[in-house]
Structure formats: structure tokens, C-alpha cells
């Protein structure tokens, strides 16, 4: 079973950039679609971006044009490049295996995530 460790978060000013990493352990990583999700204080967790096993990508409207998801199967890692960050991007970011059929994570288990804080 795939397990994930998220990293790369931090404090950045509005307009700045961060690159998040999602390192996976376990087998069959390359066969899985992966999603980046985020949860802001007091809000539901939401889907930010997805990447299929064939590297097809999709984005939430709120981040389209600013965020880029990519994967390196040789390193068992998925990345989220975040540019032109806004205060509303402040959240804990998580990665997980993703189901395009349901539009949700395939598992209820979540890692610790990585905190992104954008100051205005």
C-alpha cells in the first residue's frame, strides 16, 4: 500500500512561489493517479490538482494557471509548483491516491501534510 510524506511548505509573501513534494513509499506508485488536496482552517478539504498515471493533469479553477502538478516515477515523487501565491492559498496541503471516477481520494488515510502560509 502506498504511503505519502508531504514537504516543502512554508511562509511566503503574496506573489511568491513554493514547490511541494509528495514522496511515496510502497509498490505500484506509477500506476496510481495522485491528487494534491488542501484544507484551510474551518473549511472542508478540497481537491487542488490531479495527475494520472499517464501524466494527464487537471486543476481546480482557483489555482489554474498558477499551480503545476508533475510526477517523477523514478523518484516515486509528485510535485506541486505553486506560483503567484495568494493569501487564500493558505492551508495544509496533502497528497493521496485519487479516483477520477469519484473525484475523491481513494483512501481515508491522510499523512501529516505540509503547511503553506501566504501573507498579504
Image (cartoon, rainbow, N blue to C red):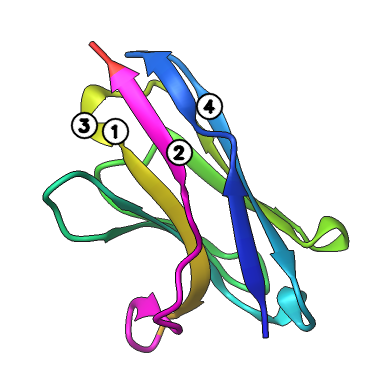
Which sits earlier in the primary sequence, circle 4 or circle 3? Answer: 4
Which sits earlier in the primary sequence, circle 3 or circle 2? Answer: 2
Which residue, as the protein is rendered here, is positioned at the far left?
42
Front: mark 3 or 2: 3
The residue beneath circle 2 is 67
The residue beneath circle 1 is 90
Does 63 appear above or below 106?
above
Which residue, as the protein is rendered here, is positioned at the far right?
74
Q: CA distance from mark 1 to mark 3?
A: 5 Å
Q: CA distance from mark 4 to mark 3?
A: 15 Å
Relative to 85, is 86 on the left or the right?
Answer: left
Identity of the residue drawn at 79% across and 82% down:
27
Tag 3–tag 2 contact (CB < 8 Å): no
Q: CA distance from mark 2 to mark 1?
A: 14 Å
Tag 4–tag 2 contact (CB < 8 Å): no
Predominant secondary structure, magenta span: loop
The residue beneath circle 3 is 88
The residue beneath circle 4 is 18
Amino acid at each position: 500500500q502506498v504511503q505519502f510524506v508531504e514537504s516543502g511548505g512554508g511562509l511566503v509573501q503574496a506573489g511568491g512561489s513554493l514547490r511541494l513534494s509528495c514522496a511515496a513509499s510502497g509498490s505500484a506508485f506509477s500506476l496510481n493517479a495522485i491528487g494534491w488536496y488542501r484544507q484551510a482552517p474551518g473549511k472542508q478539504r478540497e481537491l487542488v490538482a490531479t495527475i494520472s498515471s499517464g501524466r494527464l493533469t487537471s486543476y481546480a479553477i482557483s489555482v489554474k494557471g498558477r499551480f503545476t502538478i508533475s510526477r517523477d516515477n523514478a523518484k516515486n515523487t509528485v510535485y506541486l509548483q505553486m506560483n503567484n501565491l495568494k493569501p487564500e492559498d493558505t492551508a495544509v496541503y496533502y497528497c493521496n491516491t485519487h479516483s477520477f471516477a469519484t473525484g475523491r481520494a481513494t483512501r481515508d488515510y491522510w499523512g501529516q501534510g505540509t503547511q503553506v502560509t501566504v501573507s498579504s
